[in-house]
Amino acid sequence: MDTVQKARARRVVGALVALSLALGGLLAGAAPASAAIDVTHPNAISNIQLEKESGGDGPLHQWELVRITADWAVPDGALPGETFGMTLPAEFARYGNGTFDLVDPATGAVLATCVITQGNGPEIICTLTDAVLGLENIGGSFWMTVQATKSSTEDHVEFIVGDEYIYVDLPGEGGIIPEDLTAPERPFKYSGPTAVDGRIQWTIGIPASYVQNGAFTVSDALDPAHENHHYTGDLWLSARPVENGVFVGTWTRVDPSFYTVQYDGDLKSFDFEAHGLPSEALFYRLTYTTDADGIVVEGDIFGNTATVGTTTTSTKYTYESAGGGIGTGDMYTRFMITKALTGEQSDAAAGAVFTVRYAVKESADAAKTMQLTVGQPARSDRAPIGSTFVIEEIDFPEIAGVAWNDWTLTGEGVVANGDGTWDVTPATAAGVELVLTNQADAALGHVTWSKVDPGGAALDGSEWELRAPDGTVIPVVDNGTRDADPVAGELDVIDLVWGDYTLVETKAPDGYQRTDEVYTVTVDGGHLEVSFGDIVNAPAPPAPPIVPEAAKTGPAGTATTGVEIGGIVAAGVTLLAGGAIIALAADRRRAEVRVTHDDEG
């Protein structure tokens, strides 16, 4: 048989296969769809192309298999249960069971399941699965095998995608060439898929020349050298008239009363006998099905051999998917962060704006910042799933009366780095919720004062007692205990809690009198730096003169006047003492003690 004859024979067998499948319910007739199908994402499919399943550039013939390829994509945020699809041309019908999955090649996850309806001009509808949750940039490609069930003189066919009619060129030239109706002259055998997974349909062709006296026999056996399968018991005989070597009319079922079939015990072989058939020239076709004994996977081979009279014919069926595809998506994650405050000054800081800086570990991207307010969650930008975010708080707001203590970050998977930063690696696309807590304490204050003489010169060496709001006495020594100012005569006591403080001098500088004044100031949020001002010490009075011992024994007069010397001395001493007292009183009146408060805080 030459190449042309072989090709012709293949087309005839292909036509017979298609007709057999049609009678078996695999290619049920249906009117082509005329409107867009009802799906969630009607415009998801693009880049539709056609090629012959057998390859080659020749024209497409009726009943040949055609491979459709296309791309698909759905918007970000697409949800499980949502659908996309299209309507196929009226010249095509599905081949096989019409179901396939769109699988992520990296993870094996099924992103969508697709179903092709029966009939000419079928619809394909794909339904998204739970695997799309959290994905972005969802899409991929798919392919499916269909059969060219109708001839056409057009060089293209029409798909309906959304509200658009998409014209796609047919492979080869000349449209879809009508089937070759030449009847085969020798017995043949072929196989094909059914709508049931693991079920195979087998057909034996019996030319009229093999029918003798209205009878013929067929012995059939399954090939044990390949995958195990068994007869289902479904079997029927069809006939079609032949005139001048060409099929005419249509295929019709033969009444079972015209044949018998006997299966062996393990359903691995049978003997068929037809009898009492009409004398007219009819071509017969014996069709039956087998089921695989186990799970069927891509590439499984099933064999079958039949003997018609004395002529043996055999075929093999290789299980192949009639559709498939891939689906991928980018999974991202993020963190959500909420600001919380604790501490006695949390109310004072409640309206502040806080700044968080974060970066993705081992990423070349620059760090980013986000602004937080108390109780209002903020979201980071997304990063690929598996990323580790490094988070820190920066630029604490300056608020009068508030001193910021430690801050903590809490949430699932948070790890402290010990340097003021925290790591978190969200495990899912939903991200992780974090709480950033700051402790707002009351800011500590300090009080100052200066020790000076009546002329304003600094005096060193003074000692004091500063009484705190709780009654605690704080000893203060110039340039010593609790004095934070290194300058002599300048005193500064720091780290003071809020409240009223009183100051008294316990020791004056050498040569000066201790003041008995009591000084009071208040430290609070508006007065964190408070001054007692200049505190003046007056010089100590001179010590009285020492009286000689001789003057104490008795009065002695002068040589010329006879006045007693003791009396004169006593009078002089009295006058000197009185003058000193008057001078000291005047100095006290001139000395002022000033207490100054720094109202600016």
Image: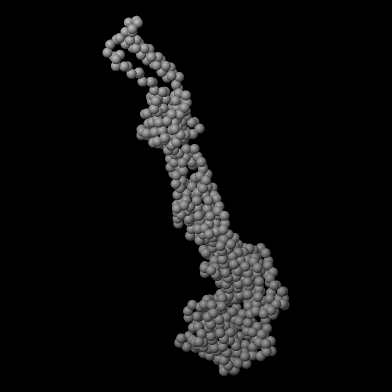
Q: Residue at x 50, y 51 (%)?
A: 392
Outermost residue toward the left in this view: 553
Q: Is 344 above or below relative to 579? A: below
Rendered location of residue 415, percent (x, y): 45, 55
Rendered location of residue 414, percent (x, y): 45, 55
Instruction: Describe the colour scheme in one phrase.
Output: one colour
Q: Is 161 above or below relative to 550? A: below
- Looking at this view, is 99 or 568 the one in front? 568
- Decide if residue 45 is on the left or right side of residue 106: right
Q: Is 475 above or below relative to 121? A: above
- Location of residue 493 (image quadrant): top left
- Looking at this view, is 465 or 30 the one in front? 465
Rendered location of residue 117, percent (x, y): 59, 71
Rendered location of residue 83, percent (x, y): 57, 64
- Looking at this view, is 505 or 77 the one in front? 505
For the N terminus, the quadrant is: bottom right
- Decide if residue 533 is on the left or right side of residue 308: left
Q: Residue at x 48, y 81 (%)?
A: 293
- Residue 31 in sight from this viewpoint: no
Q: Is 423 above or below relative to 266? A: above
- Residue 547 in sight from this viewpoint: yes
Q: Residue at x 42, y 38 (%)?
A: 495
Outermost residue toward the top in this view: 561
- Decide if residue 192 is on the left or right side of residue 426: right
Total of numbered circles in the picture? Answer: 0
Q: Residue at x 53, y 82 (%)?
A: 301
